[in-house]
Amino acid sequence: MKSPILFLAAGLLCALAQAAAPAPDLDLGIQYYSRVLTPEGVTRESRYEEKMLRRPGHVWVERVLPKTAAAPEAPAKHKVAFKPAQHEHKEFNHVVIPRHLVLEQNKLRVEYVDAHARQVIAIPATEYENVNFDGSWDNSFYLLNPKLLAAMPLSKQVSSVPGARWREVEKNGVFQRVLWDEQKQIALVIESGDKAGTFYRRVDAKPQASLSRELPWLGLRGYGQKEYADFLD
């Protein structure tokens, strides 16, 4: 029987080798679900969907909105306090505007693309937290940093997806499980929660059968350039 140290070392080398190989292009449909039990005994649930395009040096993510939701092309407006009515200030809603990540020469660029206003809004690193971005290219490109994955032991859970394996870790009653597709280099499922049932989160990523031929970031010629600070009061 292999020792745990050798077992983890082998898994680490394998995962790092996979990450070093070029990751294939992917179009993904991603579902997010979370459940939290509050101290008041209230269970709160949330779920939403996104679609993601992954290409070398590019990650494009946009929210999938139900038909009954307000269209992102017509976001709400509000007037800045103590200013004349003609000074109307348009809100920046990062949730409903597509996010575009670009990695060039190991430098990360984060921008949002407002197709209705024909504007590209640049986000500086100091404002990542305000748009709910953790600053990690790997977390966006793979949905989970491969280095973190490599530290997770293989699970006994059997995968029904060819070429994908479960990894699992548990500490102090908190668990995380990941179904990793080794060929596609993507996390197909990410689960986390606690044994007490106070919280649970799950991400399901489904690779699409075909790839988009029209890449949205190639159609930005003529778009105006704005800074995140332009939207602050």
Image (tube, rainbow, N blue to C red):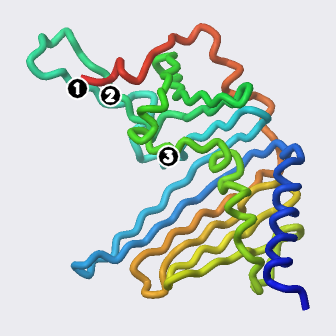
Q: Amino acid at mark 1?
A: His
Give the labeled residue for mark 2: 91
**Which of 54 and 4 lies nearest the eye of the viewer?**
4
Front residue (pair 46, 165): 165
**What secondary structure is marked by label 1?**
strand
Asked if labels 1 and 2 touch by Cβ distance under 8 angstroms, the answer is yes
Coordinates of residue 193 in the picture (x, y in percent): 50, 76
Q: Earlier in the sequence, mark 1 or mark 3?
A: 3
Q: Position of residue 64 (x, y in %)?
A: 54, 46
Residue identifier under label 1:
78
Residue 199 picture quarter: bottom left
Residue holding disc 3:
65
- Badge 3 crowding class, 10 Å Cα cut-off, few under 14, some 14 to 19, many 20 or more, is some
Which of disc 1 and disc 2 is earlier in sequence? 1
Q: Tag 3: residue type?
A: Leu
Specify whether 144 is left or right of 184: left
Task: Give amino acid for label 2.
Answer: Glu
